[in-house]
Every structure is written in C-alpha cells, then in structure tokens.
Image (cartoon, coloured by chain):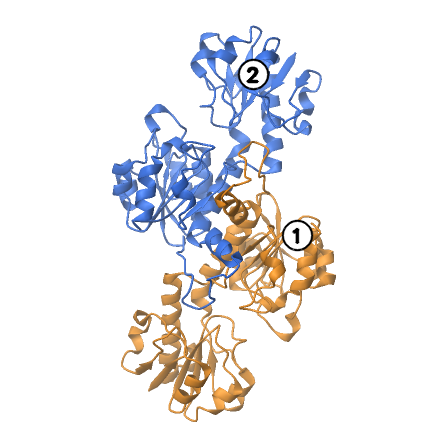
Chain colours: A blue, B orange
Amino acid sequence: MNILLTTKLPIEGFTTISEHNIIMPEAPKFTPEELITRLADADILLSTFDYKITAEMIAAAPNLKLITNFGVGFNNVDIAAARDRGIPVTNTPGPVIEPTAEHAFTLMLAICHRTAELDRRMRQPNSDIEFGVMNNLGIAIYGKTLGIIGMGNIGQSIAGRAVACGMKIIYNNRRRLPEEIEQRYNAQYVDLETLLRTSDFVSLNLPYTPDSHHIINEDTLSMMKQGAVLINTARGAHIDEAALVRHLRSGHLYGAALDVYEFEPKVTPELLELDNVVLSPHIGTGTIDGRIAMCHCCSDNINWFLNGEHHKMNRVN
Amino acid sequence: MNILLTTKLPIEGFTTISEHNIIMPEAPKFTPEELITRLADADILLSTFDYKITAEMIAAAPNLKLITNFGVGFNNVDIAAARDRGIPVTNTPGPVIEPTAEHAFTLMLAICHRTAELDRRMRQPNSDIEFGVMNNLGIAIYGKTLGIIGMGNIGQSIAGRAVACGMKIIYNNRRRLPEEIEQRYNAQYVDLETLLRTSDFVSLNLPYTPDSHHIINEDTLSMMKQGAVLINTARGAHIDEAALVRHLRSGHLYGAALDVYEFEPKVTPELLELDNVVLSPHIGTGTIDGRIAMCHCCSDNINWFLNGEHHKMNRVN
C-alpha cells in the first residue's frame, strides 16, 4: 500500500504500519502541487488538520481508499467529495483529549494571571513593571463559574480540571449528558443564552460546523458578563474576531485566550496589540508525546481499515 | 488605637476595624523615613511582605503592641527585634493558599506550553512563528511526576490540582505528613535527593529560613533530570540564580517558572534573555479578591489581639 502523508511527522509514530510504503515530505509539508502529483498512485492519504484536502485533490487520486486525518477536527477535508467517492474519513479523537484540555486550561489561567503580558513587560528594556502588593493584580479562577460550550470528551476533561481548581461548571451541548456524567463534574445543563449571561469564563469546545460559524458574535458577546473571559481552543471561525476586538477594547471582557483564529494562520492584527489577550499558534494538541500518540491513532485506523475491522475506525463521514 | 499601614491597601478590607484610627499612605508606600516618623505614636503596625521592617523601625515605636504582616512569609520582619520587645508578629496563612497554588500551577503550565514565549514571538513585528503540526511543540504535565518541596497548605493545594490534571506526586517536608493526607493526593514522601533525581517538575513551596538559602544550587540542580522544570513561587533566595541560569542555558533543564527572585525586585538580567523561562513580578497571591481577603485576615488578627483571644491569632514568633 502507498500511504501518502501531506506533512512530515515523526516516523517513530508509524511502527505498526511499517510494512507499507510510507511517503512523506523532506520539507515540513508537500506543496499542494506536489501532493496532487503524488496522489496519482496513493492508496491512503494521511492529512493533517492544517492542510486543506480539496475535491480537486481527491479527484486526482484514482486509487484512494481512505483519508485518515491527523486531529480531531476534520473541517480541512472536503467530506462531501470523499463521501461521493465512498472514501471513509477518520480522525484521532482519543489522543487529543488530554493535551487539548490541558492547553485550554493553561490559556485560561494565563489570561487571568496576566502571564504573557507581565512576562513580556518585564523583559522590555526599560520595563514599566513595578513590584508591589497592589500592582499587577489578576483575577482568580477559584470560586468562579466556567461555562463550557460543547461538552464532549475535551469539554469534560476541562471540567474535571476546573472542578479540582474550585470552579463551578455549567454547560451547553447539542444533547444533554447522562446524569452520571453531570454528577461527575457537578455540571448543570443550561441553554446558550443562560450560559453566556451567567459564566465568568466561557470555553468553546464544540466542533466547527456551518451552524457554529460565528457562534460568538456581537449579539452573543453582548450577553456575556462584565469582566468575563473567553477561551477558544476549538476552531477560529466560531468567533467573529472583529466583534471580539470591540468587546476587549471597551473593557467589557476582562480578556480572551485564543489558540485558533478566524483567518488562520493570519491573526487579526488588532488582537496582537491588546494586552488583555493571550495568543498561541494552534498548539492545542501540540506536545511531542501527543503528536506521536496521534500518529499511532492514524496507524490504528489504517490497520483497522485494511483488516476489515471497519467498526473500530474513528470514522467521521 | 493607631493602626499604621506601611502600604496603601483597599479600605474595604478593613470594615471590621473601622472604629480605630487607620493611617495609610496616599502614595503606594510610605518611605522608610516617613514610616519611622509615624511609628512614634503607632499602637499596631500592618506591614506588607515587600516592605522591610527593621530593628531600627521597631525601636522607633515605643507604643507598638503588635505587628500584623500581610502575607504568609514574614522574612521581611526582624522577628528577633520584635521578640526582644515581646511584640507578637502575625501572618495571613489562610487567604494566600488558593491564590498562590493557582499561580504556581499557572506558571507550571505556562512554561510547559510555552505560553509567554509564543505569545511574545507572535506579537513581534516580523514574527518568526509559523503555524504547523510539528512546530512550537511543548511538553505535557499529564502523566508526569511533580516533586513538591515544602508540603504545607500551599504545597497540598498544588498537589490537589496536579492530581486532577493527571500528575503523580512526591514530596519532601520537614516532617512526613499523616497517612490520610498522603492518601488524599496519592503522595509519596521521599528524601530531597530522591525528589530531585526523579521529578519531572520540582515546585518550591517551603518558607525561607537560613537553612533553605540556596537549597537549589549547582549541586542540587545537577541532580535534576534532563528536561526537568523548576517552579518557584515561595522566596527568591531559595535559588542560586547564577547556577540556575547555567542549567537553563545548557538545556539541562527544559525551563523555569519564577514569581520570586534572589535579588528582588531586581531580576538577574540573564533570566530576562532566556526563552525557556516564564517570569512574573511576585504576584503569587495577587488577585483583587485575594488582597481583600488578606486585609480581612489582618483585621481578624488585630481584633483577636485586642479582645484577648490570643490563641486564635496567626502568630509566627
């Protein structure tokens, strides 16, 4: 089997599929043109979440049998085009749970404790930072209410951390969760508007779909509490960034913590100028250990596909 | 009673002692000279952890009956001089526990996920940050071992958070803790050398005493694991910063997260140039809510003292 990777990944993540012909770029990524050429004899495509797989690419791969996407999100793949050809698309839901929850939690704490801002200002040549009892104060998460929009595995993993750090959990989800899961996090199901109006912290952890496009917009931002904090480690286009900038500039929101961007990899320039924002370059799942675990998960999906164990696959289409 | 504050603090924290004459500066702090003048008729001194109370100051206060220090640490007060005059010194252990644990946890996560470094680099005019699956990777705390040196209230509060985030806890303390507390955090008591040799993360949470001066030095740093992380939210002089810089530059340590400094408020200039360091300006307890809670705790100590309920006081000498 020819297994084509869009992106250079750690080869130690592919020990269980080493009998096959694994093709990956020398450079960090193939150019789209290089990829189209190589798709001519690819049996399986392993794509990464930051690489767009278009209908044109799928059409250029007559032998393509499987697309195994590296990441839990899969809005980078033209799912309809794959479906039309009967090509299954898989994702890697398991290994991203803990890293993404950990990163979301890191960003939430960092914006509250002004971690990036104060570190940056301390390093400036003539730093304006003065040590002092009443200087540089932040806000605590302890005792506050965290509203989680999208209470899947990642949302629940964040909830577990938040409860241990003294937070109260409310959530909104397509479906209400079973009572035993709610009890595990002492989490209360609420409608979206109630969540926005009562949360001190709002974390976005839902998949991107046309329905969730700009779920955070001028209207919904206006519902948020004075001094609230917004955290997005899901997908950039959940947020209307122009509206967010207005609510950050006015001081309505205390701050925002963002790992993903509406026009990724471009970051709205106004965000780069605000001290009440902490930014990271889409590294929600980005630890070395996490990356290798994701490679293993892609390999598992390939083996399940090839061995006819289709029911085990993390299929998304 | 004349209650003299070294530092301007939020007046809403002193409602329970409002019947007394509360004297605080207009500026953030009194100068030491101003303070000495005003000590002449002070009955009670409320000092903050970043304000040195010398033997000379204590001698300048003939009516002084109590020093109530704002903070859990009290190495800013000449305890011996106070003791010689029979003046009790109190601290504020309760309200600092959760904020300091939360801040230590924030810094630990921030150094792992490169929060300050990546935010800073993203904001640079011609940013060198490229989004990409294998770019900007950090390390996880999940599944790692946290070694806590000083397992008092703050250390235990960090342990609770760490366990919920998937960490294993080992600790060193003057006294081994009761088994029920160890079981609460699944924490294992070890000697200092074992802790240093086996921890992926080492957090300093012990009070500063002459014995703990430079507890982290060239010798003890050399015992730490390749790729380990050091977190200090206790007192700066626990660490020989020159030695720490060597171990950060060489890549022996993955990073360090520091809220306190050996020569505070001066920060060793080499630390300011290292990307594998996250710095904050001694804000371990620094949230507005936390500050007001600390004012209330000082007020309680004053009332307990004046009402003869000395057994309730948070006395440290």
Quadrant where the C terminus of chain A lies? Answer: top left
- Identify the element where label 2 is drawn: helix
Residue closer to the observer: B211 or B182: B211
Q: Which residue is mark 2?
A: A33
Q: Alpha carbon of mark 2 to alpha carbon of mark 1: how far?
A: 47 Å
Marked residue chain, label 1: B
Q: What's the residue at 71%, 16% (across, down)?
A: A19
Q: What's the residue at 65%, 28% (across, down)?
A: A13
Above or below, comparing residue A235 to residue B58 in the picture: above
Which numbered tag is attached to residue B199? 1
Residue B195 in the image, given as x and y percentages of width and height: 68, 57
Quadrant in the rendering for residue A38: top right
Amino acid identity at mark 2 = Glu
- Identify the element where label 1 is drawn: loop
Q: How many marks overall?
A: 2
Amino acid identity at mark 1 = Ser
Confirm or deny contact between disc 2 and disc 1 (CB under 8 A): no
Residue B253 showing in the rendered view: yes
Residue A183 in the image, given as x and y percentages of width and height: 39, 41
Quadrant where the N terminus of chain A lies? Answer: top right
